[in-house]
Image (cartoon, rainbow, N blue to C red):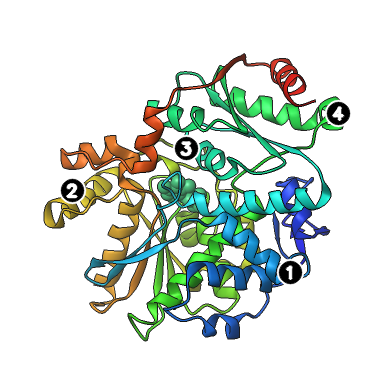
Amino acid sequence: MIFASTRDPGDQVDFATAVFRGLAPGGGLYHPLQQPDLSGVIAGFTAQSSFNEIATELCYRLLGDELSRSQSRAIVERAFEFSPRLAPLGGAIQLLELFHGPSCAFKDFGASFLAACMEHFLSHRDRHAVILTATSGDTGSAVAQAFHGRDNISVVILYPSGRVSPLQEKQLTTVGGNVSALEVRGSFDDCQRMVKEAFVDRELNRQLVLTSANSINLGRLLPQSFYYIWAAAQWRAVSRQAPVFCVPSGNFGNLTAGVLAWRWGMRVERFLATTNANDVIPEYLTSGVFTPRPSVQTLSNAMDVGNPSNFERLSALFGADVEAMRRCIEAAVISDAETLATIERYYSRSGIYLDPHTATGVLAAERYCQQHTRTDPAVICLATAHPGKFLEVVEQATGTRPMLPAQLAASLERPKRATAVESSAAALKQYLLGTFA
Ligand SMILES: *Cc1c(COP(=O)(O)O)cnc(C)c1O
């Protein structure tokens, strides 16, 4: 498979190069140049196929020119010590639970696969790399967990002091081993600026292999298609009709991975994308005009994205044709009040906790089924985070607290380890050279 930049079709690279570059040099995103037809392979999966079997086969079929079948298997086994689950929610909706990994959110799938791929490529080239990541709280923990204990890789996470939640800080600062946390006296923007400056510093890049594990990395996008295809195989034991996939969206990476799976031959009735008040893509689907703007804060804060970067990939998949995108994707915008009411309703009716992101999807899925008078199993709604990860919001809605998942509870017990640094590029450079050069 060959990958090209969304902004420069002449910039064509293999998977390994795309993984270590993250962003293409011209600022574009790497994207498959051509979509393979895997409909035969996908039709061969059954409800008995395990997630890792499906992931191994897809990894090999997609990346076979760079990874043998046994290498694909080894990477998948190393990446996924956790699995998705498909569980009925009631009515016509099933939840695809993607929160059983180490950071209790779907981003674990992408981050873990990326980590296992980098580890594989580095060990074959006998090199060491330093992953640099700035986080405002949430994405950093998936990266920290995913890269913990990987050979030939060190991770440095920058976070703004005093501006992440206590639980988030614990998740970032208690991993240890090859994962270091830098507590920056400054804002998230300062952290991001420091990382950007490190990536363009000639001296640093001469001495170290610096790379990122950003959510736009191709190595995080591709594996997200695996759980759609796994769920579609499970679905065959539930219904003869193709499912609707409902996807709570922010940067639209998760949705893009689903659309890729569809292009490769997975049967889908429709995609239903939900957003909170940050409704740039729903607006595009209505008006045909893409107008990014500053994000607004909501209760489903991992979806607070005002300029969804994966729009470039989505648009490429539909040849920049909004009509074609509309035939495949329908969008719904869910307010904070509706999110809270949905969490409350499921809790008081059936004792089920939903996290605020998943709740936007569940409400949109209910409305879809009403409109289309569907009562048979119809929708697979992606449950993107464990409700225990968003305790405050769930408590606001229900008056009670869900259990903290064991992974998160354990991090609260461990001591915080962080190095305080000034918010300057020079301070980061000094730290990196002093630690790794
Ligand atoms: C990141 C995230 C989302 C949004 O996913 P995108 O791929 O950015 O659209 C939704 N829910 C949760 C819990 C997240 O962490």
Camera-nearest label, 2 or 3: 3
* Label 2 vs 3, first from the N-terminus: 3
Element under disc 2: helix
Mark 3 close to ligand 1, CB under 8 Å: yes
Asked whether disc 1 touches disc 3, contact meaning CB atoms under 8 Å apart, the reply is no
The residue at the point 45 percent across, 77 percent down is: 233
Which residue matches tag 3?
Answer: 138
The amino acid marked with disc number 1 is Ser
Camera-side residue of 374 and 94: 94
Q: Compute the Cα span from label 2 to label 3.
A: 24 Å
Element under disc 1: loop
* Label 1 vs 4, first from the N-terminus: 1
The residue at the point 43 percent across, 48 percent down is: 105
The answer to whether residue 300 is visible is no
Q: Compute the Cα span from label 1 to label 4.
A: 35 Å
Camera-nearest label, 4 or 2: 4
Q: Compute the Cα span from label 1 to label 2.
A: 49 Å
The amino acid marked with disc number 2 is Glu
User: What's the mark number on residue 202?
Assistant: 4
The residue at the point 74 percent across, 27 percent down is: 197
The answer to whether residue 37 is visible is yes
